[in-house]
Amino acid sequence: MAIVCQARMTSSRLPGKVLRPLAGRPALQYMVERLGHATRPDRIVVATSVDASDDPVAELCERLQIDCHRGPLDDVAGRFHEVIERWSLAAFVRVTGDSPLLDPRLVDHALELYAEGGAGVVTNVFPSTFPSGQSVEVVGAGAFRQAYQQMEDAYDREHVTPYLYRHHERFGVRNFSAPEDLSAVDVSIDTSEDAALIDAIVERMREPHSEYGWADVVRLHREVSTAASR
Protein backbone atom coordinates (compact mmCIF):
# COMPACT_ATOMS: atom_id res chain seq x y z
CA MET A 1 0.00 0.00 0.00
CA ALA A 2 1.33 3.42 -0.93
CA ILE A 3 0.58 6.94 0.20
CA VAL A 4 0.61 9.16 -2.88
CA CYS A 5 1.09 12.84 -2.14
CA GLN A 6 0.38 15.25 -4.98
CA ALA A 7 2.62 18.31 -4.91
CA ARG A 8 3.50 21.02 -7.39
CA MET A 9 5.00 24.50 -7.21
CA THR A 10 2.55 26.28 -9.51
CA SER A 11 -0.33 26.91 -7.10
CA SER A 12 -2.38 29.84 -8.41
CA ARG A 13 -3.03 31.40 -4.98
CA LEU A 14 0.34 30.75 -3.31
CA PRO A 15 3.04 29.58 -5.73
CA GLY A 16 5.65 27.38 -4.10
CA LYS A 17 3.49 26.65 -1.07
CA VAL A 18 4.49 22.97 -0.83
CA LEU A 19 8.08 24.03 -0.12
CA ARG A 20 7.15 27.05 1.99
CA PRO A 21 9.52 27.18 5.00
CA LEU A 22 7.84 26.41 8.32
CA ALA A 23 10.15 26.92 11.30
CA GLY A 24 13.08 26.41 8.96
CA ARG A 25 11.95 23.32 7.05
CA PRO A 26 9.89 22.94 3.85
CA ALA A 27 6.19 22.24 4.37
CA LEU A 28 6.42 19.05 2.32
CA GLN A 29 9.17 17.72 4.57
CA TYR A 30 6.87 18.00 7.59
CA MET A 31 4.22 16.02 5.76
CA VAL A 32 6.62 13.29 4.63
CA GLU A 33 8.04 12.95 8.14
CA ARG A 34 4.57 12.66 9.64
CA LEU A 35 3.37 10.19 7.02
CA GLY A 36 6.39 8.04 7.83
CA HIS A 37 4.71 7.29 11.16
CA ALA A 38 1.67 5.69 9.52
CA THR A 39 2.03 1.99 10.25
CA ARG A 40 0.03 0.42 7.43
CA PRO A 41 1.51 1.89 4.21
CA ASP A 42 4.87 0.59 3.02
CA ARG A 43 5.70 3.35 0.57
CA ILE A 44 5.38 7.13 0.20
CA VAL A 45 5.35 8.52 -3.32
CA VAL A 46 5.38 12.22 -4.12
CA ALA A 47 3.57 12.73 -7.43
CA THR A 48 4.77 15.94 -9.01
CA SER A 49 5.04 17.15 -12.60
CA VAL A 50 7.65 17.02 -15.34
CA ASP A 51 7.58 20.81 -15.53
CA ALA A 52 10.90 22.47 -14.68
CA SER A 53 9.17 24.46 -11.95
CA ASP A 54 8.85 21.21 -10.00
CA ASP A 55 12.54 20.35 -10.07
CA PRO A 56 12.89 21.60 -6.45
CA VAL A 57 10.17 19.13 -5.38
CA ALA A 58 12.06 16.26 -7.00
CA GLU A 59 15.31 17.45 -5.43
CA LEU A 60 13.72 17.47 -1.96
CA CYS A 61 12.44 13.93 -2.50
CA GLU A 62 15.94 12.82 -3.44
CA ARG A 63 17.34 14.45 -0.31
CA LEU A 64 14.69 12.80 1.87
CA GLN A 65 15.19 9.48 0.04
CA ILE A 66 11.55 8.98 -0.89
CA ASP A 67 10.03 7.94 -4.19
CA CYS A 68 9.11 10.67 -6.64
CA HIS A 69 7.05 10.28 -9.79
CA ARG A 70 6.89 13.05 -12.37
CA GLY A 71 3.90 13.20 -14.70
CA PRO A 72 1.53 15.70 -16.34
CA LEU A 73 1.35 19.18 -14.82
CA ASP A 74 -2.40 19.77 -15.02
CA ASP A 75 -3.70 16.22 -15.47
CA VAL A 76 -3.13 15.27 -11.84
CA ALA A 77 -5.38 12.24 -12.19
CA GLY A 78 -3.04 11.14 -14.97
CA ARG A 79 -0.16 11.32 -12.53
CA PHE A 80 -2.00 9.03 -10.14
CA HIS A 81 -2.82 6.62 -12.94
CA GLU A 82 0.86 6.44 -13.83
CA VAL A 83 1.80 5.81 -10.19
CA ILE A 84 -0.72 2.97 -9.97
CA GLU A 85 0.74 1.31 -13.03
CA ARG A 86 4.38 1.96 -12.12
CA TRP A 87 4.10 0.32 -8.71
CA SER A 88 1.26 -2.12 -9.50
CA LEU A 89 -0.87 -0.74 -6.68
CA ALA A 90 -4.09 -2.44 -5.62
CA ALA A 91 -5.11 0.75 -3.80
CA PHE A 92 -3.53 4.01 -2.70
CA VAL A 93 -3.92 6.75 -0.12
CA ARG A 94 -4.32 10.18 -1.70
CA VAL A 95 -3.11 13.23 0.22
CA THR A 96 -2.13 16.73 -0.87
CA GLY A 97 1.17 18.50 -0.27
CA ASP A 98 -0.43 21.60 1.24
CA SER A 99 -1.32 19.68 4.43
CA PRO A 100 1.95 19.65 6.41
CA LEU A 101 0.31 18.73 9.74
CA LEU A 102 -1.77 15.80 8.51
CA ASP A 103 -2.23 13.19 11.24
CA PRO A 104 -0.81 9.78 10.17
CA ARG A 105 -3.29 8.11 12.52
CA LEU A 106 -6.07 9.20 10.17
CA VAL A 107 -4.27 7.40 7.35
CA ASP A 108 -4.08 4.21 9.41
CA HIS A 109 -7.74 4.49 10.42
CA ALA A 110 -8.86 4.97 6.82
CA LEU A 111 -6.84 1.93 5.77
CA GLU A 112 -8.36 -0.15 8.57
CA LEU A 113 -11.81 0.72 7.27
CA TYR A 114 -10.79 -0.02 3.69
CA ALA A 115 -9.44 -3.43 4.75
CA GLU A 116 -12.92 -4.32 6.03
CA GLY A 117 -14.02 -4.41 2.38
CA GLY A 118 -17.16 -3.31 0.64
CA ALA A 119 -15.97 0.15 -0.39
CA GLY A 120 -14.06 1.38 -3.41
CA VAL A 121 -13.26 4.62 -1.59
CA VAL A 122 -12.79 5.37 2.11
CA THR A 123 -12.57 9.04 2.99
CA ASN A 124 -13.21 11.73 5.57
CA VAL A 125 -14.27 14.41 3.08
CA PHE A 126 -17.71 13.15 2.05
CA PRO A 127 -18.76 15.22 3.92
CA SER A 128 -15.82 16.97 5.56
CA THR A 129 -15.93 17.22 9.35
CA PHE A 130 -12.21 17.17 10.09
CA PRO A 131 -10.18 20.37 9.79
CA SER A 132 -8.99 21.40 6.35
CA GLY A 133 -5.52 19.94 6.07
CA GLN A 134 -6.56 16.63 7.67
CA SER A 135 -8.12 15.07 4.58
CA VAL A 136 -7.47 11.44 3.67
CA GLU A 137 -8.75 9.31 0.78
CA VAL A 138 -8.11 5.61 0.21
CA VAL A 139 -8.99 4.67 -3.36
CA GLY A 140 -9.04 1.20 -4.85
CA ALA A 141 -7.08 0.95 -8.08
CA GLY A 142 -9.97 -0.74 -9.87
CA ALA A 143 -12.40 2.02 -8.92
CA PHE A 144 -9.89 4.68 -9.91
CA ARG A 145 -9.15 3.11 -13.30
CA GLN A 146 -12.87 3.01 -14.11
CA ALA A 147 -13.33 6.62 -13.06
CA TYR A 148 -10.22 7.80 -14.88
CA GLN A 149 -11.39 6.33 -18.18
CA GLN A 150 -14.56 8.42 -17.91
CA MET A 151 -13.06 11.72 -16.72
CA GLU A 152 -13.60 14.11 -19.60
CA ASP A 153 -13.74 17.36 -17.65
CA ALA A 154 -10.48 19.21 -16.93
CA TYR A 155 -11.73 19.93 -13.40
CA ASP A 156 -12.00 16.21 -12.68
CA ARG A 157 -8.54 15.57 -14.07
CA GLU A 158 -7.01 18.34 -11.96
CA HIS A 159 -8.80 17.49 -8.69
CA VAL A 160 -8.59 13.68 -9.07
CA THR A 161 -11.53 12.41 -6.99
CA PRO A 162 -14.68 14.58 -7.60
CA TYR A 163 -15.89 12.15 -10.29
CA LEU A 164 -15.87 9.30 -7.76
CA TYR A 165 -17.96 11.34 -5.31
CA ARG A 166 -20.47 12.40 -7.94
CA HIS A 167 -20.96 8.69 -8.68
CA HIS A 168 -20.55 7.47 -5.11
CA GLU A 169 -23.25 4.81 -5.42
CA ARG A 170 -21.37 3.17 -8.26
CA PHE A 171 -17.97 3.19 -6.58
CA GLY A 172 -19.05 2.55 -2.98
CA VAL A 173 -17.82 5.53 -0.95
CA ARG A 174 -17.49 5.09 2.82
CA ASN A 175 -16.98 8.18 4.96
CA PHE A 176 -15.73 8.54 8.53
CA SER A 177 -16.31 11.64 10.65
CA ALA A 178 -14.73 13.66 13.43
CA PRO A 179 -16.41 13.68 16.87
CA GLU A 180 -17.69 17.16 16.02
CA ASP A 181 -17.80 19.32 12.92
CA LEU A 182 -14.40 21.03 12.75
CA SER A 183 -14.45 21.72 9.01
CA ALA A 184 -14.20 25.47 9.65
CA VAL A 185 -10.73 25.01 11.17
CA ASP A 186 -8.06 25.41 8.50
CA VAL A 187 -4.57 23.96 8.93
CA SER A 188 -3.75 23.68 5.24
CA ILE A 189 -1.61 26.15 3.29
CA ASP A 190 -3.45 28.15 0.67
CA THR A 191 -2.38 31.72 1.46
CA SER A 192 0.54 33.48 3.10
CA GLU A 193 -1.69 34.03 6.14
CA ASP A 194 -2.24 30.26 6.38
CA ALA A 195 1.51 29.70 6.22
CA ALA A 196 2.13 32.24 9.00
CA LEU A 197 -0.50 30.56 11.20
CA ILE A 198 0.95 27.07 10.68
CA ASP A 199 4.43 28.43 11.31
CA ALA A 200 3.17 29.78 14.65
CA ILE A 201 1.60 26.41 15.46
CA VAL A 202 4.87 24.59 14.79
CA GLU A 203 6.76 27.09 16.93
CA ARG A 204 4.51 26.18 19.88
CA MET A 205 5.34 22.49 19.64
CA ARG A 206 7.63 21.35 22.45
CA GLU A 207 7.82 17.72 21.32
CA PRO A 208 8.68 16.33 17.86
CA HIS A 209 5.93 17.48 15.50
CA SER A 210 4.98 13.90 14.60
CA GLU A 211 3.72 13.38 18.16
CA TYR A 212 0.96 15.94 17.67
CA GLY A 213 -2.26 14.40 16.39
CA TRP A 214 -5.05 16.28 14.67
CA ALA A 215 -6.78 17.16 17.97
CA ASP A 216 -3.50 18.58 19.30
CA VAL A 217 -3.15 20.63 16.14
CA VAL A 218 -6.67 22.00 16.59
CA ARG A 219 -5.82 22.98 20.17
CA LEU A 220 -2.67 24.79 19.06
CA HIS A 221 -4.59 26.45 16.23
CA ARG A 222 -7.03 27.86 18.75
CA GLU A 223 -4.22 29.04 21.01
CA VAL A 224 -2.49 30.83 18.14
CA SER A 225 -5.76 32.35 16.87
CA THR A 226 -6.67 33.58 20.37
CA ALA A 227 -3.23 35.12 20.90
CA ALA A 228 -3.40 36.87 17.54
CA SER A 229 -6.79 38.41 18.33
CA ARG A 230 -5.63 40.04 21.58
Image (cartoon, rainbow, N blue to C red):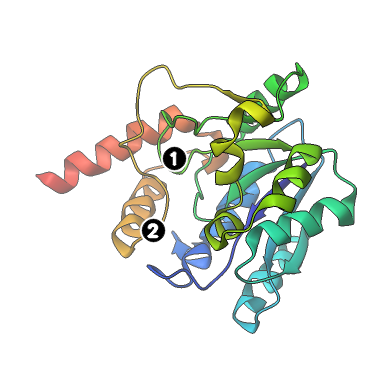
Q: Name the front one of labels 1 and 2.
A: 2
Q: Earlier in the sequence, mark 1 or mark 2?
A: 2
Quarter assignment of residue 119: top right
- Is the C-beta separation of discs 1 and 2 under 8 Å? no
User: Which class describes the residues within 10 Å of circle 1: few (<14), some (14-19), or many (20+)?
Assistant: few
Three-letter amino acid code of the residue under disc 2: Asp
Say which quadrant the C terminus sits in. Answer: top left
Residue 182 vs residue 72: left or right? left
Asked if residue 42 is positioned above or below residue 117 in the image, the reply reads below
Residue 1 at least partly seen: no
- The N terminus, quarter of image: top right
> Looking at the image, how many numbered discs can be counted on the residues?
2
Residue 103 rendering spot, x and y as whole percentages = 55, 35
Residue 43 shows in the view: yes
Query: What amino acid is at disc 1?
Result: Arg
Name the residue beneath numbered marker 2. 190
| In the displayed structure image, the side of residue 74 where residue 36 appears, left or right | right
Q: Secondary structure at mark 1?
A: loop
Using residue 175 as the reference point, say whether residue 115 is left or right of it: right
Q: Is residue 62 above or below residue 84?
A: below
Q: Position of residue 126 (x, y in %)?
A: 49, 30
- In terms of depth relative to the viewer, which is nearer, 188 or 64? 188
Residue on which disc 1 sits: 206
